[in-house]
Amino acid sequence: MTNYAYTIWIPLIPVFMFLFLGLFGMKMKGSLAGILGTLGLLTITVLSYFTAYLYFFKTGEPEGGFQAITAFNTEWLAFTDTLRIHLGVLLDPISVMMLVVITTVSLMVHIYSIGYMKGEQGFQRFFAFLSLFTFSMLGLVVATNIFQMYIFWELVGVSSFLLIGFYYQKPSAVSASKKAFIVTRFADFGFLVGILIVSYFTGTFDFDKLTSGDGNIFQSISAASFMGVSAITWALLLIFMGGAGKSALFPFHIWLPDAMEGPTPVSALIHAATMVVAGVYLVARMFVVFHFQAPGALEVVGYVGAFTSLFAAVIACTQFDIKRILAFSTLSQIGYMILALGVSEYGDEAGVGYMAAMFHLFTHAMFKALLFLGAGSIIHAVHNNDLRNMGNLRKYMPITFITFAIAWLAICGIPPFAGFWSKDEILVAAFEKNKLIFFSSVFVAGLTAFYMSRLFFSVFFGKKQHYHHEPHESPLVMTFPLMFLALASIVAGFVPFHDLITSDGKSFETHLNYSIAIPSVAIALIGMFIAFLLYYKESKVPDKISKSLGIFYTATLNKFYFDEIYLFVTKKILFNLVSQPVAWFDRHVIDGFMNSIAWAIQKTSFKMRDLQSGQVQQYAFVFVSGAIILVLCFAYWLN
Amino acid sequence: MNILSLFVLIPVLTIIGIILSRSHNMVRWVALAGMFAQLVTAVVLLFAYFAVRNAGNTDAMVFYQDVEWFKTLNIHYCIGVDGISVAMIMLTGIVVITGILASWEVTYLQKEFFISLILLATGVFGFFISIDLFTMFLFYEVAVIPMYLLIGIWGTGPKEYSAMKLTLMLMGGSALLMVGLLGLYFNSSLDGHYTFNLLEIAKVHIPTNLQMFFFPFLFLGFGVLGALFPFHTWSPDGHASAPTAVSMLHAGVLMKLGGYGCFRVAMYLLPEAAHELGWIFIILTTISVVYGAFGAIWQKDLKYINAYSSVSHCGLVIWGLLMMNKTAMDGAILQMISHGLMTALFFALIGMIYGRTHTRMVDKMGGLMKVIPFLSVVYVIAGLASLGLPGLSGFVAEMTVFVGAFQNPDLFHRVATIIVVSSIVVTAVYILRVVGMLLFGPIKNDEYLSLKDAKWFEKLSVGTLVVAVAGVGIAPLWLSNTIMDSLTPIVERLSQVW
């Protein structure tokens, strides 16, 4: 057995880097801070790769299947005798895979940012926050228990908040960061209640107990029920609510497009490759529980995923902001991963959905990070986000063009690029379990190919633009990450996931299912072809089509008015109908009551004060009249 | 001499030192030195406490000392501490010294100001070391009275009104408390040897009907100080008018006296009544938590926002206590410490920002991050602590309360728990709203461009608090375990069937 205790340094190095850059960053030169941050990241990337190598190929499968290894665990807080929070490092196939994904993308983003953020104010702060985020994300994936996951879940939330609002003088960035935090906080409320329910009934937070497949600890929670649904189903749905918030699944999707206000490398790292897949990771982590204890909840997961993927893909077809298109595309692809988990079974080939979700998570991280970094390179060159102001850029930016093309083919699902292999497995899984989800997913594959091609052709081909400054290729520090990720987007598809990451840890055989692969590629090609016709050359046809669609087009362009609905609920209902009356009630009713007591006492005492006027005549008058009254009273009673 | 008596002696000596001081500068250095000595004593006490416990001493109260004071009524100067009081003394030590630093530049009637401030601190320290209920009450009054002067003389805005309101409401609470304490006293013994000693009274079983009668007096009396709904309205006005250090001390430690009294006196000595009547106060505190948070959303004055936020957070203290199991009560006490530190931090920052911009209205300010980055970053940290970010103290406290509360299996407690948990969302809303308006965005007023960032004493003051907030948040186990151990006798008494 290999000793993995050193893995604790994988999350620790970034947090020390964060503290160091946060405290002393302002005193050093920006570039030094950038290089230090990148070197720290490089160290943990090497460590992660080394760990992955050891775990997958050296420790291997001792007894037919990868075992979870608790490399490190220390008690952090004790609630009761059984409920204790530990902080530690859990290594199993999915966490080791996530280590590789996070460190790879984070390293590329660090390198890229040295070029992209050059000359920005707060360069050191940016790298400090990147380190904070990397730490939090790594802590999340290696969590040994669900409470540790929640702790780091909150920390990634706040890192995301800080990075979205990096340009803090820009009001739109500030409100986007606020929105992201509050929407995910609301979802986390569900997550927390779910954790409370699960921990109360099972008496544990630990993943190794929860996912051991031992049904005994779930007896009481399955027996308890609320409104006709068992407590475990409720709990898992609530936990999934947390995942849906972080992964921006419908109906919590509204924060992700706005989050694009952050610097583009941040979008690539947090809002494409790592943090937003935390929800997928959470469901995968709890998959055994979902599958054996609450299949109903898993079904909900599948439908939410399928709907999100369709919904977001439709919206992506109409947007013009290059980053927002990619954001909706991310939503759609995360929907894919979630639906794959939702349709998955446990064990062997039936567990293909689980494997496919992790596979797609892996490939998507590579090509989506590449797309975002490519978009950043484009924005860097033309100083604009709008598709309508771009065109013909392939001439000016050859490296960006080629790498972007690879990512484009990967996301469209064209063999042999990475997206094809993972998407194919998802479709296979959906086909086995649920035809409705399957057809929806195939349609989404076509839409994806269409909107990505629309983006691709509009930017790199299309009409010739007059640019204020001649666009130029980005420096090597930015193009190197593009090239590296392009390479990854090609080879990632050939990683044998069915041998490494499966629902039960045992490997199984997969082979390409031609009856699904061929139609899905054909549909993707159709989508690409339509986009080619419409956008390869400048034409008026797209405008005409959008006009003819009328209300449907407008509704889609406005993202089906979900932002407006949320704004109505928060501004009009919570602010004006709850908070304002509470404030008024407090001032006028409760405080008014207290003040009126004081007022009444004061008035009474003023009146009583008049008795002590100091005037002898008045005293004499009162004295005499009192005496008379008393005499009269006595006279009356005596008679 | 008993180490605990130092906590009363040092402030008294400091006050004498201040009276004898000749210069402006000397006054503040004497005050600082005195309170630093106090903090050092608190740290020594902490280690001494651990040493005693490790040596196997399992008494409920250690460093016990009993001196007869007023024989006729059997009143004693009786002191002793357990883990909870030690933690509260540490908290007070930290908040007081940071408060002195935050008042470094007070010039108006400076000597009197520091004397009142330290007198207030004396009352708080005395309260936490007292075992005799009469002594405890005495120190409580010593803490409340200087508050009136501090707000009325050194305050801002409608200070006379606020000072009067605060004092009258707290005095009203004291009146209830006195009735309750006398009730305990006259039932403390069967043979006519009445006592105020907490530990002695705990040995007696007070008849249930009398418990039911006196519990509301005690609980409400302490509850008023803990900003229990609907007796919390002194808090927004009082804090808004109070000078910085007074807000810090008041919200940071004085409000904790309420929660501390609730479990140390009311619930510990009247356990059956606590069970019978707890539900009423659970409802009131559930309202406090949510209502305070919603109230904070609408406010525009930084101090009002923080005062309502305190109503919400202190509501959680009493709410957690009423959940009546070890975990939740541990969480409630952690919440006292956490809230004490972070609210002191908030009020310190608000005072420093107000000193620069001369306004506390969030909508008049904006973009301060650009001009005063140090204070702004600390404000963000305070905000994150307040909304329960892991790694800072608020998270630890809240989670312990929530997990503890969820161990009560009945529907009433469950519903209350879920309502209270939902406050984490509302808290995020008002914190981020303020942070967004105050620190981010463009600078609204050109005059602010020339603002200077924190001076050394300001940095030291808020820096100390940040370290404390992060310290509790990162390594909470020792503190939590210390509190849990000390809760054992209280929880045992609460769960005893008579």
Image (cartoon, rainbow, N blue to C red):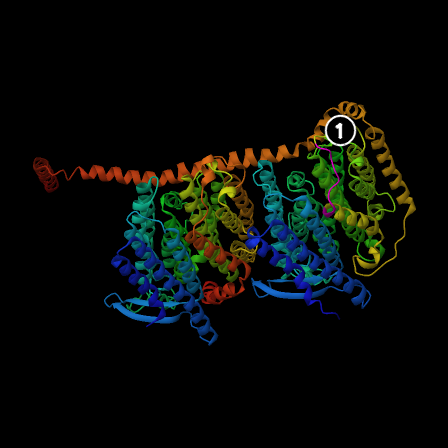
Q: Position of residue A612 (x, y in %)?
A: 15, 40
Camera-nearest residue between A203 and B377: B377
Q: Position of residue B173 (x, y in %)?
A: 34, 51
- Identified by mark 1, the residue type is Gln
| Few, some or many residues within 10 Å of mark 1 (<14, 14–19, 20+) | few
Residue B323 appearing in the image: no
Q: Is residue B139 magenta?
A: no
Q: On the image, which quarter does residue A93 sit in?
A: bottom right
* Parent chain of label 1: A
> As drawn, which residue projects farthest toward the bottom?
B55
Q: Main secondary structure of the magenta part?
A: loop
Camera-nearest residue between B383 and A11: A11
Instruction: Check disc 1 and report its element: helix, strand or loop.
Output: loop
Camera-nearest residue between A5 and B271: A5
Q: Residue at x 29, y 55 (%)?
A: B115
Q: How many marks?
A: 1
B123 on left or right of A470: left
Q: Which residues are magenta?
A: A469-477
A623 on left or right of A535: left
Residue A168 appearing in the image: yes
Q: Position of residue A224 (x, y in %)?
A: 64, 55
Q: Position of residue B313 (x, y in %)?
A: 47, 50
Location of mark 1 (residue): A465
Camera-nearest residue between A442 and A378: A378
